[in-house]
Image (cartoon, rainbow, N blue to C red):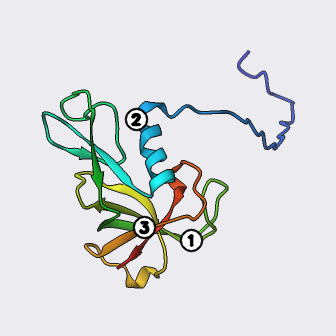
Amino acid sequence: MENWLEGLEPIVERQVIKVPYRYNMGKTASKFFTEIRDHKKIWGIKCPKCHITYVPPRATCGRCYSLLQEWVEISDQGTLETFTVVNYSTAVQPVPAPLIYGIIKLDGADTGLAHLIGETSPENLRIGMRLKAVFKDERKGNMLDILYFKPI
């Protein structure tokens, strides 16, 4: 049984399989995306014990495991904590390369939000610089309703 492939030529078949599906984001993420879609407002959720404000929001505190229910409005401006430049395109990227991903700590939040950075070049970016959200005109209720963050 050890040499069951002996004498056989392997055949490789390359395929692309599309699997359409629906995903229920749940109560917490649905409220977050509905507020962005309908009002261009970013909301976080605050832990009653740790007092940490999460953006994006979550149902349970990652530090003390408390149930999170206190919604707080967060600014659409924040500070760039880190970034990376992607110089190649893949099917899962929302825009063609080159593109810049950053972690932005929005004013009023204690956690960083990963998102695209636009209207600038990598040479002009600096850790600690201020950024502002740019919203799409036609929003659908997902993270890409924020088109990108731009320097201010």
Label 2 packing within 10 angstroms: few (<14), some (14-19), many (20+) = some
Please tell me which residue lies in front, 12 or 49. 49
Q: Residue 67, how many percent across, how many down?
A: 25, 27
Label 3 packing within 10 angstroms: few (<14), some (14-19), many (20+) = few
In the rendered view, does 102 fall on the left or right side of 129? Answer: right
Farthest top residue in view:
1
Residue drawn at 39 percent across, 84 percent down: 124
Q: Residue 145, how many percent across, how many down?
A: 53, 57
Please tell me which residue lies in front, 95 or 132. 132
Q: Say which residue label 1 marks.
A: 87
Q: Say which residue label 3 marks.
A: 84
Q: CA distance from mark 3 to mark 2?
A: 29 Å
**Residue 28, which numbered label?**
2
Q: Choose top left, top right, bottom left or bottom right for residue 152.
A: bottom left
- Amino acid at the residue labelled 1: Asn
* Figure check: 82 above or below 42: below
Residue drawn at 62 percent across, 53 percent down: 92
Q: Residue 138, how many percent across, how many down?
A: 61, 60
- Amino acid at the residue labelled 3: Thr
Numbered disc in front, either 2 or 1:
2
In the rendered view, does 77 fall on the left or right side of 15? Answer: left
- Local secondary structure at mark 3: strand
Residue drawn at 21 percent across, 27 percent down: 66
- Is tag 3's residue or tag 2's residue first in the polypeptide sequence? 2
Farthest front residue in view:
39
Label 1 packing within 10 angstroms: few (<14), some (14-19), many (20+) = few
Q: CA distance from mark 2 to mark 1?
A: 34 Å
